[in-house]
Image (cartoon, grey):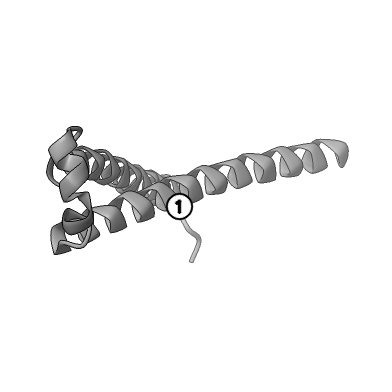
């Protein structure tokens, strides 16, 4: 009938691990996509400048741009959620201590 404290702890630890894995995955994807985009789609040379209009429309360059943009957005959203969680903890802590 009652939920054991160890079950709550185990589920919380599992949830935090999953969130950290997803966060690290998006960071890795963003980092790798940025490196690959410079290497294959926007090389730093005169020839790269000349070929840039052609290369920018290639499917793999479009996919890399998508991963760079959305990876950055995911990292931003996760920072916002972390800040939201900290603010909630601070507000609940102050409310709880005020009522003691």
Residue 16 location, x and y as percent? 39, 44
**Within the image, what quadrant is residue 66 found in?**
bottom left
Which one is nearer the viewer's eye here, 14 or 84? 84
Asked whether residue 42 appears in the rendered view, the answer is no
Residue 90 location, x and y as percent? 71, 37
Mark 1 nearby-residue class (10 Å; few <14, some 14–19, many ≥20): few
Which one is nearer the viewer's eye here, 94 or 57? 57
Residue 77 location, x and y as percent? 49, 51
Q: Is residue 99 left or right of residue 13?
A: right
Asked whether residue 77 appears in the rendered view, the answer is yes
Q: Mark 1 points at which residue?
A: 4
Residue 34 location, x and y as percent? 25, 41
Q: Tag 1, which secondary structure? A: loop
> Which quarter of the rendering shows the C terminus?
top right
Q: Residue at x 56, y 46 (%)?
A: 80
**Within the image, what quadrant is residue 92 found in?**
top right
Give above or below for 59 relative to 55.
below
Q: Residue at x 15, y 61 (%)?
A: 58
Q: Which residue lies furthest to the top in this view?
A: 45
Q: Is residue 65 left or right of residue 60?
A: right
Instruction: Count up the numbered dots.
Output: 1
Q: In this view, does 51 lie to the left or right of 95?
A: left
Which one is nearer the viewer's eye here, 14 or 31? 31
């Amino acid at each position: 009938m009652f939920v054991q404290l160890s079950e709550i702890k185990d589920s919380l630890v599992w949830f935090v691990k999953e969130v950290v894995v997803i966060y690290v995955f998006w960071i890795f994807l963003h980092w790798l996509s940025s490196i690959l985009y410079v290497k294959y789609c926007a090389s730093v040379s005169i020839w790269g400048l000349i070929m840039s209009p052609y290369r920018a429309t290639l499917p793999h360059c479009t996919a890399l741009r998508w991963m760079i943009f959305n990876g950055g957005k995911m990292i931003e959203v996760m920072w916002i959620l972390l800040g939201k969680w900290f603010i909630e903890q601070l507000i609940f802590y102050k409310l709880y201590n005020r009522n003691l």
